[in-house]
Every structure is written in C-alpha cells, then in structure tokens.
Image (cartoon, rainbow, N blue to C red):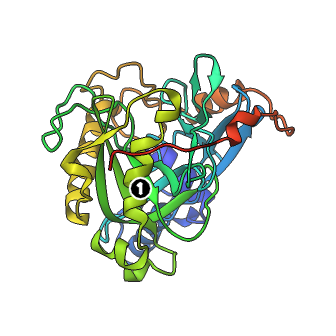
Amino acid sequence: MSFIKLSHVLRCHGFARLVTSPSRVVAAGSTVRAFTAFVKLCRNMSYTTVERGALNSTDYRVYFKNDVGVPISPMHDIPLFADKENKILNMVVEIPRWTNAKMEICLKEALNPIKQDVKKGKLRFVANCFPHHGYIWNYGALPQTWENPEVLDEATGCKGDNDPIDCLEIGHRIAKRGEILKVKVLGTVALIDEGETDWKIIVIDVNDPLADHMNDVSDIEKHCPGLLKATIEWFKIYKIPDGKPENQFAFNGEAKSREFALSIIDEVHEHWQHLIQQEADSGGIICSNITVEDSPYKITTETAEEFLEKAPEPAPELQPVESIVDKCYFVRSKL
C-alpha cells in the first residue's frame, strides 16, 4: 500500500496522528502499538453491499464496498483469512439457505458482483428435489481462491472448474445474500461436476452456538445427524430434473477432514495468487482489484467508483418468476 493511500485509510479510521511521514509509521513506542491496532482493525474490516437492477431480472447485481465506502471485488479484495493464525476464513454468501435462485460471483464483469446465473436466456433456479427445497445450507465462496481449469487436481484426477472454491455453511442462521461470514473449516467433499473438480468446503459460522463444539468433519454427524448424507444426495440429484445425469463424487462421496480441506484451500489460494499476478491464463476472468500490491490488474478507487456508476439503477420492485420455480421434483438417487 502506498504511503498516500495508507494515510487516507489511517485518517478514515482515526489514526491521523500516524500520518506525518513514512518513518513515523515504524517509530517506536505508542506509534507502533497504534499501528498494530490498525492492522488488527483491517483484519476485522466490515463490508456493505449495494443492490442494482431488479431482483429476479438479468440486470440484478450485488456490489460490495469496504468500510470506507470504496467499491471492491469480493473475489479479489476480500482477504481469504479473517484470522490466519486461527485459520478463520471469510466466506461470501451467494445463496441463503432454502432459496433456489442460482446466484454467483460474476467473474466476467468488473468488480465481480453477485448476479443470477442465466442458461439459454433464462434465469437459473435450482430444482426442488424432494424432500429438499432450494439450497440446504448457506451457499457461497471463499474469496481469493481459484480452481484452475488448467491444473490437474492430484486428489481427484480432474481439472478445476474455473471458479472460486465453494462453501457450505451449516450453522442455524439463514444468512443474507452478500453477507461476509467468518467461518471455521470442518471438512470437504469433492463433487465431480461434468468432469471437473468442484470442491465443497463445509464450514460453520464462528458465531454459531455449535461452532465451539464442532472442530472436524466427524463432529458434523454428531451434532447435525443426516446432514452429510443429505448433502451428498442433494448434489447427486439436483441436475436430474434438467435432464442431466446424476453427479458423481471423488472418494465415493466420503467427506474429508478439516486438515485435508485446509490443504485444498491452500492450493486454490496459491492458484488465485498466480491468477491475480498474471502468472496464469485468466481465461476471461476479470481481475480488477484495489488492494493487491504488485498486481498488474490493480485499479484506482476512482476507476472502481466509475464501474459502479455504470451499473443499472436500483429497482425496488421484484420481477415475477414462473410458477415452475416452486415445483417439487421426485427423483431417485442410485445411492
């Protein structure tokens, strides 16, 4: 971070006394303690969202701002770790539990807003496969991760799916679209989706009442009996109503441990680092960011503001959806 930009952020957070010269930042005594407090503050940075367009329309977008009101990319500017020492991660919630609009971080647009996926010109809603309705967890992604489609995953034997790694948050609360949760990793399952590796990291909100009692994948069945089985079934059958075959899993659907999951996260974070430094083919992914030092894709805050200004105007009225979205499908897994 340049000294000018650091000075601006310090002032916004009440650390104006540090802004005298670059050397002041590294001075001894109280100044160092104040700067340490600032670093901790950055770790606990809060984020806000800005909705544009009308919900249930192709114009709908959810943009993100940091706590000084600057537009950011949820893919590139929100750090992976909320607390690296304790391995607490940030999770971007794309789809709240029990909803079925297929929302995702858009990799092809500047600032990577959340938008609804479109297939054959129509908004995509996942089918309600009995007894499930919509997504059965808070569904989202880990920022600053990327499953590289050019790299063969040694664990699965399949290449990545060109997306940030997916997250299933299993706490009791229904999160909000665009919410940033601090989560604890419990384990992972490896979906093989149309021949591509699509890891699903299972996590729990650190503020959930069960978080202190759940530390590894084995604790899921203990405290949430049936959830892992339902998770495997959900992913196996959710595309069948669309005429596609049942999905498959690596490891015969076995959920892997927290330690294994953290190793996978480290790998996809490294892939993202290559992406953001232009050391890997972006494949059309927009990598504009305001925080990643030495990234050739880094932009100014003014440019970020201009991107947001060009977005569709907010539209408070919901657009109607077809009644077929609420249909319940009775499908049978080969389990």
**Residue 142 visible in the displayed image:** no
What x and y, as percent, mark residue 292? 39, 40
- Residue 240 against residue 255 in the figure, above or below: above
Q: Residues within 10 Å of mark 1 (few under 14, many from 20)?
A: some
Q: Residue at x 30, y 62 (%)?
A: 187
Give the total number of marks visible in the rendering. Answer: 1
Note whether residue 329 is visible.
Answer: yes
To which residue does mark 1 refer? 231
Image side of residue 12 versus residue 279, left or right: right
Query: In the displayed structure, would residue 46 be above or below residue 282?
Result: below
User: Who is closer to the viewer here, 66 or 167?
Assistant: 167
Where in the figure is residue 116, as x and y percent of width and height?
Answer: 61, 33
Q: In this rendering, is residue 268 above or below 12?
A: above
Q: Relative to 78, is 316 on the left or the right?
A: right
The residue furthest top is: 120
Q: Quadrant of the N terminus?
A: top left
> Which amino acid is tagged 1?
Thr
Label 1: state its secondary structure.
helix
Q: Position of residue 94 (x, y in %)?
A: 56, 46
Residue 311: image quadrant is top right
Q: Quadrant of residue 274?
A: top left
Between 146 and 310, which is closer to the camera in this rendering?
Answer: 146
Q: How far from the left and from the top, in percent, is residue 192?
A: 29, 38
Residue at (32%, 50%) from the top-left corner?
A: 335
Q: Residue at x 15, y 44 (%)?
A: 155
Q: Is residue 235 left or right of residue 261?
A: right
The single residue placed furthest to the right in the displayed view is 317
